[in-house]
Image: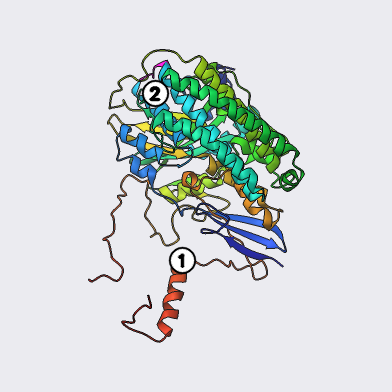
Amino acid sequence: MKFQIPIGPQHPALKEPISLRMTVEGEVIRDADLRLGYNHRGIEKLAEERTYLQNIYLTERICGICSHSHTTCFVQGVEALLEVVAPRRGQFLRYLVAELERVHSHLLWLGVAGHEAGFDSFFMYTWRDREVVMDILEMISGNRVHYAINTLGGVRRDIDEALRTKILDSLGILRARTDYYFKLGANEPSFVGRLAGVGRLSKEDALALCAVGPTARASGVAHDVRRDDPYGIYGEIPFEVCTADSCDVLGRTVVRIKELGQSYNIIEYLLRNLPDGPVAVKAPRRAKPGEVVSRYEAPRGENIHYIKANGSDKPERLKVRAPTLANYAATLAMLKNGFIADIPLIFAAIDPCICCAERTVELIDGRSGRPSQVRWSELRRMAARRAGRVSKKRNMEWPL
Amino acid sequence: MNDLERIERIKAVLGERAAEITNPSPQRIFLTVPARTLVPALEQLKTELGYRHLSTISGVDLGDVFEILYHFGYDGGNLNIRTQIPKADPRLPSICAVIPGAVLYERELQDMFGIIVEAIPDGRRLVLPDDWPDGNYPLRKDWKHVRAAEKIPGGKS
């Protein structure tokens, strides 16, 4: 006997609107389906009516966590179209903010994973330590979320010697805390027991379904755009691509904790080798006709922007593919043959950002084969029919 | 393997199927393939040369034709396979048999451009609402968004 269960678009286990539909047999998920669009804002269409400079601020608002990855991806592409090269100090600062953003995003994710696994002290620890990096980001850019630091031809703010020393000091705290998390995450029996073996994604599936980021790396697929297709200054920065081959949520946790360590090394390298000079150059407003594909390793995986210029100061086309969208197909594969109770954990393990990707899952009645989800319009009609049947109380006063 | 060697190998494998191949900047290869030979070409590129990571599919409205770009990532750069289909008869073969991860991008193309992806395993709507009027494809250049007049619930008029 099979049932279809809808999860979302509004659900206590999900932080953002997405509709998942699961076909379940008892406690076991047999099939999963996805419906997106609850957060679609038409940004690609909107971008065609904005200038390149205005689009930086638009792309920043694609996501509330990896805001810098979208602007950097966009700015890298537009700088290539405008034939401008950002000065070295500007590039160092741009990728410094990028790595700090990765640290804050991974710490946030670790907290969410702890919370979904029922380990709330872990959640509170990681989020407390995340404030260290949030404070650094605020000191650099003036903002905690939308840093607005990128501009065409460089970055908008410089850092001074005092701030440089302060960030280096803070790295010591973050390193010590991350080592503690690694010990905890790998050794705490109840935590490991909850995560190990949940949400399996084999290496073959990860490759076939084009998974990206920590989700793919935890299945032994060593893809990282920073190494595979180096952009900016990543060609000269030494770092390792972290992988795991356990193919489950535990692997995804381990990969992210290891990546934190790599990010601290990159931040230290950038600060110790920070060149002198200007942080930005003046960029022209119009781009010659042309096209460019810009790729970027966001905290959640590969982010890709395709920009086509038509000779004016506005893009002809801006295509954005955020990493979460690339991981949905893999998520559906992970959910299959899992348990209902694992849904939030598996879903949280890809670190979904619905704002970026925009999608859903539902559950189905397998006995009748009829979906138990109804459209909003149908619900509204049903509500109106029901309202039509109740006795009318016009001009009634609400008991306040 | 540098870009030039890659281009040579792609040419050798695809033969006359590769209509045009350019290398406008380092780490970026653009290959043009006619729509009718797209699936066999992708199959060959996947099995013989290992291009299997599809990053995304971009659609562009060029007036009379749609240009579809399949962005493939590889170790060292990015291969973009370009194909064009007429706007009057926007039919595109599905590549899901070769690249199973392409289904969401193809559904998005159907929603946003009104392209009919033939033999798609799952052709339901993905991003547009269920009650979206038929024949409205937001990313076509001739589609303009008109904001509906604001109605205040319970207000006069």
What secondary structure is the stretch in magenta mostly built from? loop
Left or right: residue A340 versus residue A295 is right
Q: Residue at 59% across / 46% down in the picture?
A: A112
Mark 1, chain letter?
Answer: A
- Looking at the picture, how far across and down is residue A51, in whole percent? 29, 35
- Front residue of A128/A283: it is A128
Q: Residue at 47% across / 20% down in the picture?
A: A164
Q: Is residue A78 above or below residue A332?
A: above
Amino acid type of the residue tagged 2 in the rendering: Ala
Amino acid type of the residue tagged 1 in the rendering: Trp
Q: Can residue A230 be seen in this view?
A: no
Residue annotated with mark 1: A376
Q: Which mark is residue A243?
A: none
Q: Residue at 72% across / 64% down in the picture?
A: A26
Magenta-colored stretch includes residue A286:
no
- Looking at the picture, how far across and down is residue A362, in whole percent? 58, 59
Mark 2, chain letter?
Answer: A
Label 2 sits on a secondary structure element that is: helix
Q: Which mark is residue A80?
A: 2
Q: Is residue A136 above or below residue A268?
A: below
Q: Can residue B140 be seen in this view?
A: yes
Q: Residue at 60% across / 68% down in the picture?
A: A370
Left or right: residue A221 versus residue A170 is right
Pick out the residue farthest to the top. Answer: A276
Q: Give the range drawn in magenta.
A: A84-88
Pick out the residue farthest to the left. Answer: B157
- Looking at the picture, how far across and down is residue A160, in whole percent? 41, 19
